[in-house]
Amino acid sequence: MGKKRIILIISIYLCIGFYSSFCYTQQCPTMTSPIDGDINVPVDNLIQWTAVDGVIGYLISLGTTPGGGEIINRRSSGLNNFYQPTVGLPENTLIYVTISLFLPDAPIKVCPLKIFTTVNITDPPVCTTLASPLNQETGIRVDTNIKWNYAPGATNYLISLGTSPNNYDLIENFETGNILSYKPENNLELNQSIFVRVIPFNENGEALLCTEEYFTTGEPTVQCNPNDFPIITIPDKVSLCSNLEFGILNNNQIARGYRWIKINNDGTENLISTNPDLEFDEAGFYRVELYNIISEFGAIIECPVTKNFEVVDSELPVIENVIVSREPNGLRIEIEATGNGEYEYSIESRDNGFQDSAIFTNLEPGERTVYVRDKFGCGVTQRLVEKEVSVKDFPPFFTPNGDGINDFWQLRNESDSSELNIEFIFIFDRYGNLLAQLNPKSEGWNGHFNGRELPETEYWFKAVSYSQKVIKGHFSLKR
């Protein structure tokens, strides 16, 4: 007795010290329903086994081969010591059961196989009922997944859907297979009663006289709030620039959806893009639709905004001339620009200070740049005005011999992108006699005085800028 007592005490200490890895790994449950080796087991039988103390979960596999998982494979039942096969078991089949134990701080324990044989079914299954949505339930999502309860013995189901009793205009007698749900290919209509008939069947036939059930989809109660609508910042007119093969209109606003529509001359419309930005290659009238969406009962509700706009032919402006003149209150600048477009003007910068008028008044003398911009995005042209000048800007000689080359003497402006800052030019002979007064924008002096040619010699000039700066120099007349 003393020796047995010592052995028992040692065993207790071992169980305490190696709780999971020694004691409980040696235990496995007993099948209670069905019993191991049982026959004629109903196909919808609940699989049950005795609880095992200390486990933290169970795994169960059901197969048609020893250790197999053809029916279910290592399915967790949590801490429940039972499992209900979702679509039942195959009839007249030897079923192999494997139960595994989760133990704390120990490997999974796989218990010995158990077996049972299911009943041979010789009759069709009975009818089933809806599980979700329930019969006559309302406020159902339009994208609902229709589910029904398992019909014992069924191996397949026929489902029919319609919008009125016994009228299956959505789908009729569709075979779902041995599953308990069906999701319509398209969303159902809002606020619509949907009539459902599910017929279970097996190799022995179909269930008879199955009752039609129905549910009703929801009716939206939400409305678009101001914050639900996108913002459109597209201008009324957009240019199609002549130097580009096509134009791109950037929306620059975030929305859930985009629709670009071309409005034809006969009033018909064509949807041409659903991208955030539009690529276009012809002038005409268009409409853009931006929308966000809200959802209720699974239905998508659009919150749209729309705007019509025109694409017009246009091109980069060309600055032909800048006319600078003096007025009592300052200088006056007038910009002459040409091109197939609508233009605006600035003397401030490429980005700011634009106005519709090409005339600027009451200006201080000084070097500045003028800008002409296509209103609809074809670009900006600029030109320097009142560039500071020096003696180097005047030619050192000219040859008025009538050969068409260098026949006139004038202030040089070799750049098309600038206007020189000279208001008057005076020409004198060596004795200081005034021979000519030139406009800096004129053709120039031809070497004549009072209708007669002057001799080859040196001549002097005085140029006066708009800011009253005086530049003096001399040049040669050669024939």
Image (spheres, rainbow, N blue to C red):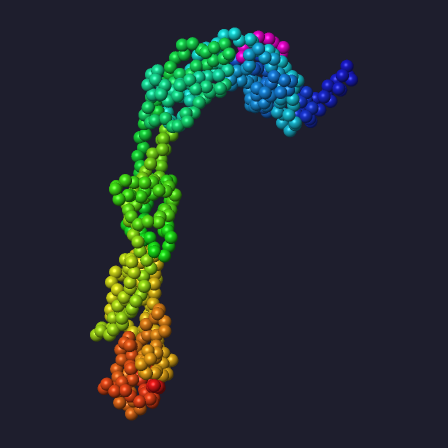
In magenta segment, residue 37: yes
Which of these two is toward me, 266 or 311?
A: 266
The segment highlighted magenta reads 35-43
Seen as rendered, the residue at the extreme bottom is 431
The quadrant of the rendering that contains the N terminus is: top right
Vertical comparison of 155 with 370: above or below: above
Residue ID at (29%, 64%): 337
Q: Residue at x 59, y 12 (%)?
A: 93
**Toward which corner of the image does residue 173 lie, by quadrant?**
top left
Q: Point out residue 123 in the picture as x, y percentages from the top left corner.
A: 50, 7
- Report the label total: 0
100 relative to 278 in the view: left or right: right
Whole-percent x, y for residue 383 in the image? 34, 67
Q: Residue furthest left?
A: 328
Would you place residue 343 above or below residue 443 in this image?
A: above
- Which residue shows up at 63% across the image and 17% down it? 65
Query: Which one is in front, 159 or 426?
Result: 426
Instruction: Answer above or below: position of 358 versus 432.
Output: above
In which quadrant of the rendered image does the C terminus lie? Answer: bottom left
